[in-house]
Image (tube, rainbow, N blue to C red):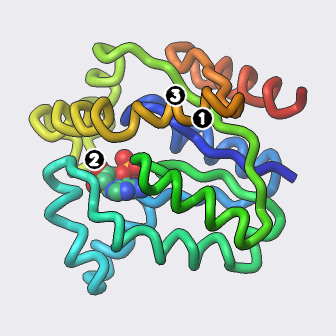
Amino acid sequence: MIRVIFLGPPGAGKGTQASVLSKDFDVPHISTGDILRSAVAAKSELGQKAESYMNSGELVPDDLILDLIRERLTQEDAGKGWILDGFPRNVSQANFLDKLLVDIKQPCECVLNLEVPDNVLISRLLERGRKDDNEEVIRNRLVVYRKQTEPLIEFFRSRQQLVSINGNQPMDSVAADLKQVLQS
Ligand code: AMP
């Protein structure tokens, strides 16, 4: 059983690696970005509220995300473990998650941080070509990451929960490094 939080900038490979680990360890891969993109595609109320933030590379407001994560983590399949990809994204989400995990008795000790240099991130994202992957939006996503999400590295490091991994390697090597950490 594993419970893991993935940290790292956009383009670091969180989604790819979370999906590999999710298959290997048979636990759900919970990506707030995927949940939001489905909501946008379905034109739900959540999707309509989130879309403009996503298209400009800003974080969607916490009040749209917090209920959603509580609901997702209390679904039955999350009882066997999970991999969080894209949440928490700022300190207030991290504090919310702390309380939630105590509440639902799902402790998480392991935060995996994928490190990749900016120039590699930008070229990877440009290649990926998602709707929010044009150069201007990518640059803003990196600014938002530095300002709001990067402080979480220290947040988790100070609690001895952080393990950093070199994400600037071939996919299989990153996956092997991650598995080694999880099996140790
Ligand atoms: P991602 O797929 O994780 O890169 O997320 C794509 C977009 O969804 C982000 O640029 C944000 O606009 C939004 N998003 C995803 N997760 C969160 C979150 N935890 N808090 C706020 N916005 C989020």
Circles 1, 3 touching at the beta carbon (< 8 Å): yes
Give the x, y percent position of residue 94.
51, 51
Give the x, y percent position of residue 164.
61, 21
Alpha carbons under labels 1 and 3: distance apart: 5 Å
Label drawn at residue 130: 2
Q: Which residue is mark 1?
A: 156
- Name above or below for residue 136 compared with residue 61: above
- Name above or below for residue 138 compared with residue 67: above
- Place residue 71 in its image quadrant: bottom right
Closer to the camera: disc 1 or disc 2? Answer: 1
Q: Pick whichever of labels 3 and 2 is earlier in the sequence.
A: 2
Alpha carbons under labels 1 and 2: distance apart: 30 Å
| SS class, disc 3 | helix
> 10 Å neighbourhood of mark 1: few (<14), some, or many (≥20)?
some
Label drawn at residue 154: 3
- The amino acid sitting under disc 2 is Arg
Question: What residue is drawn where x is 42% and y is 54%?
Answer: 92
Question: What residue is drawn where x is 40% and y is 68%?
Answer: 65
User: Is label 2 within 8 A of ligand 1 (CB to nearest ligand atom)?
Assistant: yes
Q: Is residue 129 left or right of residue 168?
A: left
- The amino acid sitting under disc 3 is Glu
> 10 Å neighbourhood of mark 2: few (<14), some, or many (≥20)?
few
Give the x, y percent position of residue 51.
20, 67
| SS class, disc 1 | helix
